Image (cartoon, grey):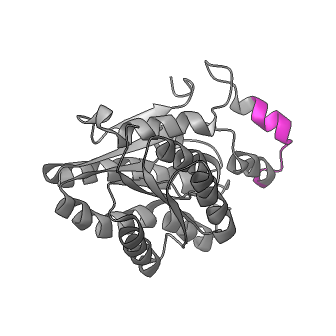
Amino acid sequence: MRLENKKAIVTGGAGGIGRATSLALAAEGAAVAVVDLNADAADAVAEEIRTAGGTAIAIAADVASEPDIERVIATSLAELGGVNIVFNNAGIIRRTTAVETTVEEWDRVFGVNVRSIFLMCKHIVPVMEAAGGGSIINTGSGWGLKGGGQAISYCASKGAVVNMTRALAIDHGPAGIRVNSVNPGDVNTGMLRDEARQLAQDTNAFLAEAADRPLRRMGEPSEVAQAVVWLASDDSSYVTGSALVVDGGGIA
């Protein structure tokens, strides 16, 4: 129970890494606000946590919307009694080159992947400062640390996340707020399978290629979730501004 009496917000909390992390945080004692655009899916994850004996609420929100972010924070404070942990995990990917990417797609990817983190931090940092500190974890990507093909908006957005995390750590460390990014490689999620669809590739062949890394397999959402739990907990009390890679050796 490393997170007993802690309160957490998880964006993109209803599927894949977000769901696994919501469950993992709750298992360590945190009360969790499961935030997702899909209201029914968020409700299902919150109910799963409550059924297991934990505390959770579901909040439907568009994380690229400032009013929605303000509502998420206000609701979390009112219903959970505080916020000590934020996992900015919501993200989308478009598998296109610069020539193929529309301006609308570019803006939406940056809205969900980057603007959402800025908005959350803009409004949650004062809350954490008043409480004496906290931990913010942002979902980057291996492609935030190196380039990838046919994913220009995603690569650019995740590169922004990694360096924005460092800037946040510098600015808010004196207030006791730690800010880190977790950077997964290919993980066994619906989002990964959707990439195969976007590229019009055979799903099995695409997943086999995703497993071509030193550990010879894709990651599981629960493995990324455990890295987030560590960054959220006092076990990582001297870690801030870091880009933790969880990718089975892919970048190596």
The residue lying toward the viewer, choosing from 77 and 209, is 77
Residue drawn at x 37%, y 37% is 2
Residue 51 pos. (x, y %): 62, 53
Residue 92 seen in the current view: no
Q: Magenta segment, principal secondary structure?
A: helix
In which quadrant is the N terminus drawn? top left
Task: Specify the quadrant of the image occupied by residue 243.
Answer: top left
The residue lying toward the viewer, choosing from 233 and 110, is 233
Location of residue 168 with respect to 119 vertically, above or below? above
Q: Which residues are magenta?
A: 198-208
Location of residue 6 with respect to 216 vertically, above or below? below
Residue drawn at x 49%, y 47% is 26
Residue 241 seen in the current view: yes
Residue drawn at x 56%, y 63% is 109
Residue 207 pos. (x, y %): 76, 35
Q: Is residue 153 magenta?
A: no
Residue drawn at x 57%, y 25% is 248
Residue 96 pos. (x, y %): 67, 56
The residue lying toward the viewer, choosing from 15 and 113, is 15
Residue projecting furthest to the bottom:
67
Count up the numbered dots: 0
Left or right: 152, with 135 as reference point: right
